[in-house]
Amino acid sequence: MFSEVLKQFTFAQTKHRVDSVSDADVKAALNRAQSGIVLDESDLIALISPLAAFHLEKMAMIAQEITRRRFGNVIQIYAPMYLSNECRSSCTYCGFSYENDIRRRTLTVDEADREADLLYAQGIRHVLLLTGEDYKNTSVKYLSEVCKRLANRFSSISIEVYPLKEQDYIQLRQDGVDGLAVYQETYDPDAYARVHLRGIKKNMQFRLDCPDRAGVAGIRKIALGALLGLSESVGEVFALAAHARYMLHTYWQSQLSLSLPRLRPAEGLTNVPIIPDRQYVQYLLALRLYLPDVGLILSTREPMEFRDHMSRICITQMSAGSKTEPGGYSGMPTDVQFEIEDTRTVSDFCAALRTNGLEPVFTDWNTVLK
C-alpha cells in the first residue's frame, strides 16, 4: 500500500532537499532527461527546485519532445458529469462541503441519462461521473444503475466518487466503469487533518490506499492528483510523483494519469492561495520529464490561453465544455463545486486544438481491454 511508502519521507525533508539543490544538479537532471535516461528522485528534486525555474525553456523543449514522441499530436477529450452535489464531509476548500448553504441535488437515473444524451450529442465519448461524499444518496447500487444505463453510448466511463472497497470496484467494472480518478487533495498529513474537518473524507489512509484497491480490482485507467494550495507545493508534487512511480511498478496493467489542479474560488472559499503560472508550469514539466509515459490532465479550472499553451507542450488529456454542478448541461437549478475558467464549447475548444496542430480524440479504442 502506498500509505506505507509515504511514511518514508516528510514534507519538511522534501523542502530541505529542494533547498539544497545546486544549478549543476539541475543541469545534470536535464541532460539525463534529454538523453532518454530514466530519472531518479534526486533528479525530480532538482527539477522542482527554485533553481530549475531558470531553465524553464529547456525543460519545456525536452518535455515537448517527450510528449510528441510518446503520445503523438493527440489530446484525449473528456467531459465531467456531476451526478450529485450532496455531501456528508466538511472540507474547507470545496463548494459542496456539508456546512455550505447551497442548492443540493442528486440526479435520478433518468435525469443522468438525459445529461449523458446532451454530452453525447456534443461528441463526447469519455465521460467522468462525479459525486460528493455521500454513501446514502449516491450508493454503489445507484452508481451501478447509472453506469449500466450509459455503457452502450460511451467508449470510456470513469468515476470520481468517494473511496470504495475493492469489491465495489470489481462490481462497477462489470457494470461498465473502466476508469477511476481519485485525488488525494493533499499528501501532507497535517494539512489533510486541517482541511478535512468531519465525515468519511477525514480518513486519510482509506483515501490514500484507494488507488491500490482499484488496481487490485483491475480498473484499467487510474488518475491520481494533488490540489495545489493546501500545503507546500514542492512536497505535493514530490509525493504525487512518488505515488505515480509506485502505481506504475505495482499495477503495471493499468494506465496512469496525473492531475495537478490549482485551488479555485468556491462557496465558502474566496481567499485562494496563488500558485504563479511560471511555478505551475515548472511542476507540470518536471512531472513529464520524470514520468514520460504517464498522461497529464489539465481541466477547465485553468484559463483558455493557459490551456492552449500547455496543450502544445506536455498535456495529453483535457476536459471540454465542463459543468461542475449536477444537471448543469440541461440547465437544472443547482450550485457548482468550483468556478471554471475555460468556458468554450466542445466544438470551439477542439477547433483551437486543431489550429495548434493537435488532434482531439474522443473515442477510446481500448474498450476491448475492459
Image: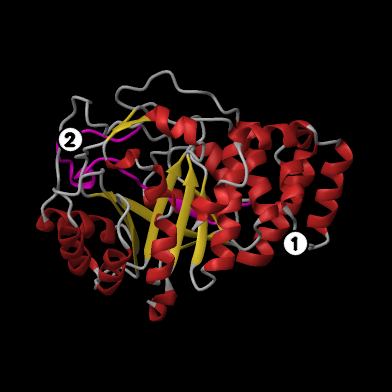
Across and down, in percent, residue 78 comes to 39, 56
Q: Is residue 311 magenta?
A: no
Find out whether the residues at labels 2 and 1 contact each other: C-beta distance under 8 Å: no
Residue 106 seen by the camera: yes
Q: Residues within 10 Å of mark 2 (few under 14, many from 20)?
A: some
Tag 2: residue type? Thr
Which region is colored magenta?
Answer: 313-338
Residue under circle 1?
Answer: 38
Q: Quadrant of residue 300?
A: top left
Q: Secondary structure at mark 2?
A: loop
Question: Residue 40: where, in percent of width, then height?
Answer: 74, 55
Residue 191 located left or right of residue 336: right
Query: Magenta-highlighted stretch: main secondary structure?
Result: loop
- Name the residue located 29 percent from the left edge and 25 percent from the top edge: 267
Residue visible at 85% across and 53% down in the picture: 31
284 or 57: nearer the viewer: 284
Q: Which residue matches tag 2?
A: 334
Drawn side of residue 201 relative to residue 104, left or right: right
| Residue 163 % position (x, y) | 32, 52
In the rendered structure, does residue 336 fall within the stretch colored magenta?
yes
First of labels 2, 1 by sequence position: 1
**Image quarter of residue 157:** bottom left
Figure quadrant of residue 180: bottom left
Q: Is label 2 or label 1 in front?
A: 1
Residue with the most extreme right position: 24
- Secondary structure under badge 1? loop
Q: Is residue 315 visible?
A: no
